[in-house]
Amino acid sequence: MEIVDLSPQEEKLYFRCLEDWSEEMEEAGGHKEHWYHQMADRGLRVKLARDDRGITGGMIQYLPIEYSTASGKDLYFVLCIWVHGYKEGRGNFQKQGMGKALIKAAEEDVRLLGAKGLAAWGISLPFFMRAAWFKKQGYKKADSIEGMVLLWKAFVKDAEPPKWIRQKKQPELHPGKVTVSAFINGWCPAQNLAFERAKRAAEGYGEDVLFREYHTSDREIFLEWGISDALYIDNHRINTGPPPSYDKIKRIIGKRLGRLKI
């Protein structure tokens, strides 16, 4: 196994989270590429894992915590660590140690950059970004919000634990119309996919639906709301993990419109 820095030759693969075979990734648009070029000058780091055949099967992306959804000092934050686990495309690389190798490489990298620790997010459910997996790698819980666990590993004694930046307000409603509020950061194609589907579904209803988009890679916008990626239909937050289908979003909007006309 080999851990390497992202090269220009593999940027397109990275933008698609190693799922270059997936048609859904086309639907997610160019948001991740735009975000990458925006964050590359702000300390974003990306590493890839290759097996002994030289095939890329895993990735990790992390950046200074000042550009994440948490607050902290002298820390980096792991946005995601992903090992390709589908039969389609390049195949299943999970349970081969790639995840452990990637997190170790990131820790060594940020130590050299002078960081006092590395933070990450995890969830309690047994799939992507499991909090339990990070705990096995020596990470400890620092904070949590509704099942989203903030974990960290301190490198020095005087490191200060991070905290989640919490939501500050709700989207506004507009009398007589359905309001679709879509928050997008850009780093995650799955969330970008939800954004694009919501935008398309809202536009299909014409003037009866207001579509409001918030690009939270702009730090001021993120801090104003305390929301990174989210989808609201009126005051109801839609679960976007995994991203809902276009038909589901359209159906929810249609039901809300029907209630307005009663």
Image (tube, rainbow, N blue to C red):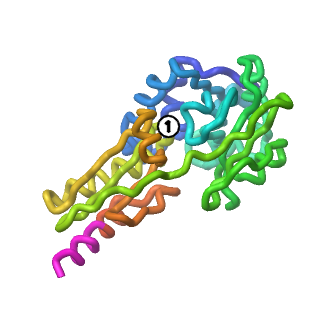
Q: Who is closer to the viewer here, 11 or 212?
A: 212
Residue 79, above or below 86: above
Quadrant location, the N terminus: top right
Identify the residue shown where x is 54% and y is 32%: 67
Element carrying mark 1: loop
Per the image, is 61 magenta? no
Q: How many marks?
A: 1
**Compared to 29, does 170 lie above or below?**
below
In which quadrant of the rendered image does the C terminus lie?
Answer: bottom left
Taking 123 as reference, is 81 above or below it?
Answer: above
Q: Which residue is mark 1?
A: 187
Local crowd at mark 1 within 10 Å, few (<14), some, or many (≥20)? many
Q: Amino acid at mark 1?
A: Trp
Residue at 50%, 41% in the rendered image: 188
Please identify the dominant SS of the magenta region.
Answer: helix
Name the quadrant containing residue 169: bottom left
Residue 52 can be seen in this image? no
Residue 247 % position (x, y): 33, 64
Along the line of sight, the residue nearer the viewer: 2 or 70: 70
The answer to whether residue 206 shows anywhere in this view is: yes
Position of residue 152 in the picture relative to residue 210 (left or right): right
In magenta stretch: residue 260:
yes
- Give the magenta range: 253-262
